[in-house]
Image: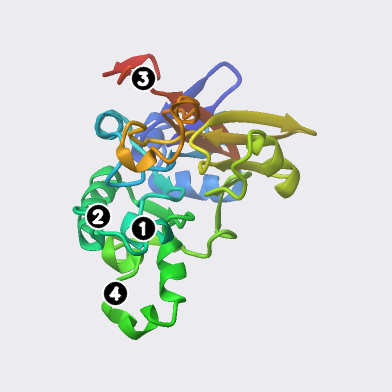
């Protein structure tokens, strides 16, 4: 996006061509003005970027209706980037909780097949793609650390390989729990604390503007001019795999995601809540 600011108004253009045509100048003059911070015809030119931030999906136990709505949102809005901020996969098949048990249908190849499909569907058409590992992707590392598992070598695909992230052009941040992506003046990470006051603890541990998922809950905490955003999840809270948590705990989970606009290296956050398979963005209802 290109923002043109004059004394009287602000105009947004989806493409540079629309902006330099409006200003009645050449392409080269336009981009030189951006690089040098110069005005054209009394207008200040600012590049803006719009990113989707997708919290915990736990594929294949994701909320299919919510994902379909996000795909509809993409059709009506241009996004420069997308960040999956961890626990994209559930990785049930490698969970230490399932050792010694047989769980029909909980097969790693099936999880990877579903994950590859939905990650591709959600991110299709977006240029900059970022994938941050969560504690559930890290189940692969914990599994492979075991002596018996190491005998498998490269035969057992990692999430990066199973989801074909490199082939899809993803920037991969796989250093859980320290992995983070910086967008403007905002740190995006999976999450390092799931306590009731997680938003507060993330702020006090990072002392930065920070956004995370992990808890499946919604929360905002601000102090000393910094803000911490806990942006919920996109899981099917009624899936059997989540019944380790009581219904009262799952009732606190929040169905939401975020859109982040970056203007002049400052990030502006919009957390979008999904209620009864419906959300509103830019005055438009998606259901």
What residue does disc 4 label?
156
Which one is earlier in the sequence, the residue at label 2 or at label 3? 2
Q: Quadrant of residue 265?
A: top right
Q: Are marks 1 and 2 in contact (CB under 8 Å)?
A: yes
Near mark 4 (Cα within 10 A), the count class, few <14, some 14-19 or many ≥20, is: some
Residue 108 in picture, x, y percent from top left:
26, 61
Residue 220 in picture, x, y percent from top left:
63, 29
Near mark 3 (Cα within 10 A), the count class, few <14, some 14-19 or many ≥20, is: some
- The residue under the point 51% across, 41% down is 213
Residue 159 in picture, x, y percent from top left:
34, 63
Q: Which mark is residue 103?
A: 2
- The residue under the point 37% across, 49% down is 88
Question: Which is closer to the viewer, label 2 or label 4?
Answer: 2
Q: Secondary structure at mark 1?
A: helix
Query: In this figure, which colouring scheme has been used for the structure?
Result: rainbow
What residue does disc 1 label?
98
Q: CA distance from mark 2 to mark 4?
A: 19 Å
């Amino acid at each position: 996006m290109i923002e043109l600011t004059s004394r009287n108004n602000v105009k947004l253009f989806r493409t540079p061509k629309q902006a330099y045509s409006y200003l009645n100048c050449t392409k080269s003059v336009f981009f030189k003005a951006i690089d040098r911070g110069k005005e054209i015809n009394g207008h200040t030119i600012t590049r803006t970027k719009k990113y989707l931030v997708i919290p915990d999906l736990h594929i294949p136990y994701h909320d299919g209706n919510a994902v379909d709505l996000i795909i509809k949102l993409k059709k009506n809005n241009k996004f420069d980037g997308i960040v999956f901020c961890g626990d994209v996969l559930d990785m049930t098949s490698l969970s230490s909780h399932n050792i010694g048990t047989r769980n029909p249908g909980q097969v790693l190849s099936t999880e990877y097949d579903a994950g590859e499909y939905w990650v591709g569907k959600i991110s299709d058409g977006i240029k900059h793609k970022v994938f941050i590992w969560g504690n559930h992707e890290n189940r692969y590392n914990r599994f492979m650390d075991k002596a018996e598992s190491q005998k498998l070598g490269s035969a057992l695909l990692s999430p990066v390989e199973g989801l074909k992230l490199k082939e899809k052009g993803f920037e991969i941040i796989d250093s859980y729990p320290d992995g983070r992506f910086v967008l403007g003046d905002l740190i995006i990470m999976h999450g390092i604390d799931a306590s009731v006051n997680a938003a507060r603890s993330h702020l006090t541990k990072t002392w930065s503007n920070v956004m995370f998922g992990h808890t499946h809950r919604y929360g905002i905490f601000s102090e000393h001019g910094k803000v911490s955003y806990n942006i919920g999840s996109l899981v099917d809270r009624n899936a059997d795999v989540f019944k380790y948590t009581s219904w009262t705990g799952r009732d606190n989970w929040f169905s939401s995601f975020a859109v982040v606009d970056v203007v002049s290296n400052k990030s502006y956050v919009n957390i979008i809540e999904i209620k009864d398979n419906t959300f509103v963005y830019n005055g438009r209802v998606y259901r």
